[in-house]
Amino acid sequence: MLSAINQPESIRPRLQQVHHLYSDSVCGPLTMAPVRRHAYEAQFKLQAISYAVLKGNRAAAKEFNINESMVRNWRKQEAKLRRAKETKQSFRGNKARWPQLEDQLEDWITEERSAGRSVSTLAIRLQATAIARDLKIQHFRGGPSWCFRFMRRRHLSIRQKTATPAAAEDYDEKLSVFRSYICSKITDQKIPPHRVTGVDEVALSFDVTVESGKPALTVVLGCHGNGQKLPAMVILRRKTLPKDPFPAGVVVRANQRGRMDEEDMRAWLREVYLQRPNGYFHASPSLLICDATHAHLTATAVNQAELPDSELVVVPAGLTNKLQPLHTGVIRAFKVRWRAAWERWMTDGGHTSKTGRPRRASYATICEWVLDAWAQVSDFTVIRAFARAGLIPEPPPGNETDSDEKTPDIFDGDMSQEFSSDAELETLDGYEEED
């Protein structure tokens, strides 16, 4: 075999070239085969760790046909692996840039929740900004993306896990009977979709704790089966109406409890329902769908003489989430847009008191959010909600005008699912009322 050892410097490069040509012609180019990397799930790693604890790392590597160094690394990650999902394969993602800030923020969240106060993502971002100011951290923005990554790193969520009660044995039968009753009514009396109306309330809150259960305001929403939306009614938790100049297109009332009662329901029938097109002229029969609350039943019975063309249809108790059109998609779309408007207003800055606490928006501003959020809910969303409730046929595909299932301009994908809430009462606590 040719060698360049002990050869003069002048002929050594030539000998090396001959050596390379000889090696390539006889043995082929010297290249290593690519090594395929394997990804193992957390459940598999924990099994290997348990085996290694009993019989050692080398025995575990031989048993599971893996490298011994992998077993050692997995044992160092045992605590994280036990907290992770069984199907998780790796721990990717950036580490915390400000660990001290995140430690204090997590402690604050724990204290707030221990005291029974709900914590929204916006409250987390505002508190993080205050902590960063105290720690003299520069260039900290605390945006929605950072908040999402922080909550994922600390295994936090604003969505509470609730136990779903077991459905009654005749649950499906009740759904079928009610839908058949509605469909037969519509068919026999030839009721068009624009004469089928659903009404319900959604409670919103700014500065009350979870245990109090008192909303800051209640919004009454009504819509027809053809996608048309009735003007929204806002019920403020006050004894009297404020002197704010409210925007046109929304009905505002005051109630000491902040919830709809019989008087408010009668006002909605008088100022909203009867004001719809052909509300006073009984050209064809109508259906008014609502749930079995005392305010709905009492007020509608009192006003039955004034509503001779309308028939009240009460959704059976326990079936509201399936049969009430507003619960099958309309309320969620509205709340997502209302919350987005509130978060944009809070993050704009300049809404703090002398003590540094964020102020609450004026009632006129809140009503503007309600008006804009309700206008942004598309007609297709309303029609689809009625179809999901089984009250009208499914709309033809391809008519989607927008996407009401996502949070607008804030989160996408997993972030939207993480931050959005389906709760009827949203509590956004810790804010002072603006003068």
Image (cartoon, grey):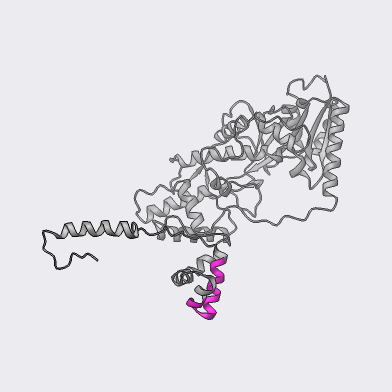
Q: Which stretch did the figure color magenta?
A: 44-59
Residue 245, image x and y in percent?
Answer: 57, 29
Residue 428, image x and y in percent?
Answer: 57, 47
Direction right: furthest residue: 188
User: From the viewer's perspective, is residue 306 above or below residue 212?
Assistant: above
**Number of marks in picture:** 0
Type of secondary structure dominating the magenta stretch: helix
Report whether 175 appears left or right of 15. Answer: right
In this view, the residue in front, 100 or 433, is 100
Residue 280, image x and y in percent?
Answer: 79, 21
Quarter in which the N terminus is drawn: bottom left
**Visible residue check, residue 346:** yes
Q: Does residue 52 belong to the magenta stretch?
A: yes
In this view, the residue in front, 292 or 190, is 190
- Which residue shows up at 60% across the image and 58% down it? 116
Direction bottom: furthest residue: 55
Report whether 258 appears left or right of 38. Answer: right
Quarter assignment of residue 203: top right
User: From the viewer's perspective, is residue 110 above or below residue 417?
Assistant: below
- Which residue shows up at 86% across the image and 31% down it? 185
Report whether 294 appears left or right of 363. Answer: right
Residue 140, image x and y in percent?
Answer: 38, 49
Quarter assignment of residue 224: top right
Q: Does residue 51 belong to the magenta stretch?
A: yes
User: From the viewer's perspective, is residue 385 above or below residue 424?
Assistant: above
User: From the viewer's perspective, is residue 387 above or below residue 168?
Assistant: above
- Which residue shows up at 64% across the image and 45% down it? 215
Report whether 30 appears left or right of 235. Answer: left
